[in-house]
Each structure stands twice: as C-alpha cells, then as structure tokens.
Image (cartoon, coloured by chain):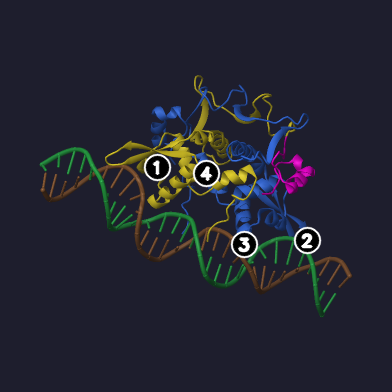
Chain colours: A blue, B yellow, C green, D brown
Amino acid sequence: MQHTSFEGMSCPIARSLERIGEWWSMLILRDAFAGVTRFDEFQKSLGIAPAMLTRRLKGLVEAGLLERHAYSERPPRHEYRLTARGEDFRPVLLALMAWGNRHFAPEGESIMIVDRKTRERADPVLVDRKTLRPLVGPDYVVTAGPAANERLRQRLAEDRSLDFTGGVR
Amino acid sequence: MQHTSFEGMSCPIARSLERIGEWWSMLILRDAFAGVTRFDEFQKSLGIAPAMLTRRLKGLVEAGLLERHAYSERPPRHEYRLTARGEDFRPVLLALMAWGNRHFAPEGESIMIVDRKTRERADPVLVDRKTLRPLVGPDYVVTAGPAANERLRQRLAEDRSLDFTGGVR
DNA sequence: ATGATAACTATCATAATGATAGTCACTACG
DNA sequence: CGTAGTGACTATCATTATGATAGTTATCAT
C-alpha cells in the first residue's frame, strides 16, 4: 500500500518530509554528515538491508540531497556526497539532536555540540539572523506567505496564527 | 515487514526518529501546533485515513508528545494536546520549515516566520544560547558526550569529528 | 584458477498502508 | 417515539513496502 504523497501540499514542512520523511532517510543523512560516503559504510553503520539502502540512497539523490561521484572506473564505483541542499539540512538535524538529548537521554548524552576551543557545551536555540531574538517566543509568529492559498490565509487569520503553522496542505 | 526499530541506538537523532519518524507523525504535530486538537479536525486537515490517524495519535501519546484530554463525558470525547515535550519540538519543525522554504518553494513561501510587530521576515539560524554564535560553522563541533560508548568515541576522535555526528548507533 | 571485495539486484514472507464501510454512544429534531 | 446526524473510532481487505538473505557482476590480488 503506497503511502500518501505530501507532494501536492504547499506547506514547506510537508514538502520537506516528502523528500526526507521516510524511515531511514534522516539517519542516512546523519551518516553522510559524519563523512560516510560508500555503500558498504552506510550499510555497516546503519545495519540496514542492502535493498533498502539502495532505495533510500536513490531517493535522496533524486531529491537533490546527495549526489553520486565515481571514485573508481574499473570496476565502476560510486560514493555518495552531500549537495549544497543536503548541507543546508544540518540545522534540522542539530535541532533534532538537541531535542533528543533533552528528552531521550536519561543516561546522559552520547553526542553533543561543544565549542571547538573551550569544549564548553552548546545550548542550541533558533533565532533570527539579524535580530538574534528567539523565534520560539512572543516576538515571532508564523503567518501566510506570498504563495499562500485563500484557505490558508483564512486559517492563519484566525487566532491560530498566534500558535504556529496553518495545519493545512 | 516490521521496520527496524531505532530504539536500541544511543544517538539522540535515532531516538527522536523512533518516536516521530513515521510517515504522518510530524504533520500531525505541525497541526497540533496550529491548534488542531480533535480527531475529525486532524483527519480533515491532513486527509488521512482514520485507522492511520488512530495509530499515529496513539504512538504520539505513548511517546509523550501528545496527551488525551476528555472534553465531553457523555458521549466520552477526547482531544489531543501537546505536552511540554511536544512543545519542545517546535524548533525542529521551524528548522524544517525554513529548509523547505529555501529549497522547495519555487512559487514563494506559503507560510513563513515574521516579526509579530514589524511583519519583517525572519531568517532562522541555530545559535548557542549564551554566545549567540552559529552552531553551523567553525566555532562548534559535534563530539562524544558522557554516555558515548567506546566505538563512538573512537569514531569521533577521527577527523570526522570536524564534520558532524558519529554515523553510529 | 580461486578468493575477496564492493555495489548492488532478486526473491519472498511478513507487516504496514489506505480506502471504505461499520459500530457505538450520544444529541437534536420532528 | 423514531430518525438523522455527529464524532471517534474499529474492522476488513487488497496493495505496497519492508527486511532477510542469497545471488550476480566486475573487478583485483594471489
């Protein structure tokens, strides 16, 4: 049974999930950020079935997050590297890591973000680049953008715009 | 065929995905942030099969992101509200939204984050709460934490610590 | 020639998925 | 009273995805 595609939705979250929202995809990206490039490396680090890995790598290549680079002609051999779009996914993974560390690490963190020089632990917060004020809080709000359809505009015109997103496609 | 559980992994990203990584889960959370609380509302806004919605809501309740609140005794009726843990997921969704807006909105953004007062568009960046320096960049690094196992420590002791995460469980 | 390696591909039994109808416990209305 | 509507699921079933595992191919090394 094919799962419902989010491709027809205009919400950026839905569109993102269409490309990275399948089981295994984000863990593959995590490992790509860790420098894993080859098929057998991904397979070993993830403990994933080869057919599954092939499918997911293909999907990530098609979505423009990874690209295949030949590293041997005879025999033909490829490695998988992050594209600029893939690199841009880093904050999402870091935010997910921070949330996981806060809620699912009763024995302490296994990985964390530290200052490169001082080794002091970082506490991630999402802010606006210019004002440096936190986006989670009273200063900022999610609202309809230039490409919002009428239904979304109405929805966000209600009190719910105080909360978050549209709850729509 | 049951998909592989990430529960046995120590990585916080894997642990997070174990709880929110299934198809539909994050979109349900998106809508919960938008104030959606009732079963039929979720169903309408998402266009999801009822049996699927039941399963996913149950999973999110069990994972501690949503909780059921009775809003009617006769007939018994429940709504689903975000827990503190669920609320804490907001930065992840905002980061995902920002990434989606940057890469998958050729027609412009349908939703975006703006300053509540000035309506000026926000540009999200992940920083350290204290230093306000970006976590993506030369200042910060991902490293083994107190609960890291030996394999992860070794892995991160290599040059790969310059990149990102461990590429391990 | 044999063996090892890397990158897949093929096969198959099991589980998940989505579509859709049904169920139940109400409330509202004529 | 009966009927209809509503909301929150549950049950059923055909289709697709999943993971386990063996196989294939094209090398290279001995």
Choose mark 2 or mark 1, whichever is in front.
1
Q: Nearer the viewer, residue A44 or B30?
A: A44
Whether label 3 touches label 2, CB < 8 Å: no
Measure the C-alpha gap from mark 3 to mark 2.
Answer: 23 Å
Point out residue D17 in the picture as x, y percentages from the top left corner. 53, 58
In the drawing, what numbered circle is on residue A73?
2
Q: Nearer the viewer, residue A83 or B42?
A: B42
- Chain letter belonging to callout 1: B
Residue at 59 percent of width and 45 percent of height: B15
What kind of residue is marked 2?
A: Glu
Whether label 1 touches label 4, CB < 8 Å: no
Which span is picked out in magenta?
Answer: B141-169
Whether label 4 touches label 2, CB < 8 Å: no
Whether residue A139 is visible here, answered yes or no, is yes
Measure the C-alpha gap from mark 2 to mark 1.
Answer: 52 Å
* Residue placed under numbered mark 4 in the picture: A15
* Residue placed under numbered mark 1 in the picture: B42
What kind of residue is marked 4?
A: Arg
- Co-location on one chain, circles 4 and 2: yes
- Chain letter belonging to callout 3: A
- Co-location on one chain, circles 3 and 4: yes
- Mark 3 Cα within 10 Å, few/some/many (few <14, many 20+)? few
In the drawing, what numbered circle is on residue A51?
3
Measure the C-alpha gap from mark 4 to mark 2.
Answer: 36 Å
Point out residue B166 in the picture as x, y percentages from the top left corner. 71, 45
Residue at 59 percent of width and 53 percent of height: A59
- Chain letter belonging to callout 2: A
Q: Secondary structure at mark 2?
A: loop
